[in-house]
Every structure is written in structure tokens, then in C-alpha cells.
Image: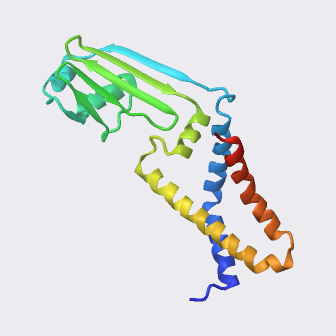
Amino acid sequence: MRFSLGTARQWHWISAAVSLVGMLLFAVTGITLNHAAVIPASISVTTVESEVPADVLTLLQDLPMAEMPAPQPVRQWLGSEHSISVPPDVAGEFDGMEFYLAWPGPGADRWLAINVDDAALLYEGTERGWIAYFNDLHKGRNTGPVWFVFIDVIAIAMIVFTLTGLWLLVKQASHKQSTWPVTALGLLIPVVIALVFIH
């Protein structure tokens, strides 16, 4: 199949349209990640300490000593009494004395422990702000399978965008003498930095 100039242009703008928002997101968060040490963090910590009612304790005491999601009545009690929203598919662990559950997310860390002997709940949630949230999206940290697929799709669109851009450069180079010197410079600069300044 012949890959014409018109086809290259069509795929170039399609891939640009698909990856536009993702490319901007990853470019901006690339800057914020690169300067993370000088960007002030906005950290908010929520701690909950509470007595656990007998019916909730009974449910936990009957659990096998293994990894499993929190029972629905336990999650319902946490949500209604303490506004703690536990995802139903997150597995916790019960060792006979304590039920421990952690569910980190982008820009956030959350965990809780319920001690069945002391009938005590301890919960801690840490929110690190919007910049940390978008930085974690960039890294794919604790973002789930849908975002994992989204990153792949955007990456493929970016590859198509760059390869069709290269094809357009090849076809248009004869009309612009600076095409290959500028392209070579874009390749040479990171290579020199990597070889000379990174040890």
C-alpha cells in the first residue's frame, strides 16, 4: 500500500487530535515532576480513631486469616459513621487480631486498621494536592487498569504523530534547507547531555 503525502497529513492530524490533551498533560506534569523539590506540597492528613460496634467486630472475627475485601456491612458502617469510602474490590488482610486495609490513589494514600481485641478503628488519609494528583497520573501510580490502557493509547498516538511528522519532513525537506540541521540538533542535544553530563 502506497503511503502518500496526503495520507501522512491525514494520520498526522488525526493522531494530533487524539493525543492533544494527553500530550499537554504529560508535558506539563513533566515540568512539575522535574521541579518537584521546589514546588510546595499541599498536604492534608485526616485521622480517625473510633470504637468499633459489636456487630462489626463479629463480622470481622468470623473472617478467615487471609486476604479479602472488607465485608459490605463493614464498608457501610465506615461510610455512614466516618465518611470513609472503601472500594469494594480492594483486598484487606486479617491476621486473627487486626484487619488491615490500604487503598492508595493518585495524589493520596489511605489505610485503616481495625483491632478486634481492643474494638478500635484507626484510619489515616493523606491528600497531597492537585499537583501530586496529576504527577501520579503521569507516572501511572495507583491509577487502575483503565488509565493504564489510556496511557498506552496516548503513547501509540504520539508515536504515530512523530513518525508521520518525520515522513512530512522527508517530503518537505527540499523546500526548507533548515529541516535536517534543526532535526539533527534535536537529536544531538539530548545525546550530548546524556554522554557528557550524566554519570
Relative side of 68 to 50, left or right:
left
Residue at image x 21%, y 17%? 116
Where residue 154 appears, as percent x and y from the top left, is: 56, 59
Q: Quadrant of the N terminus?
A: bottom right
Q: Taking 34 as reference, is 52 left or right?
A: left
Q: How is the image coloured?
A: rainbow
The residue sitting at the bottom extreme is: 1
Task: Give the quadrant of residue 33.
Answer: top right
Quadrant of the image for the C terminus? top right
Please state the horizontal and vertical placement of residue 42, each as a whole percent of the image: 61, 26
Give the residue at x 62% y 26%: 41
Q: Position of residue 91 (x, y in %)?
A: 28, 36
Query: What residue sits 58% from the left and 35% below the top?
Result: 132
**Quadrant in which residue 30 is drawn:** top right
Query: Residue sitting at 66 percent across and 52 percent down?
Result: 24
Q: Is residue 34 above or below residue 123?
A: below
Looking at the image, which is closer to me, 82 or 155? 155
- Residue 167: x, y in percent? 69, 76
Q: Vertical placement of 15 versus 92: above or below? A: below
Q: Is residue 187 left or right of residue 42?
A: right
Label tally: 0
Note whether 20 is above or below 98 in the view shown. below
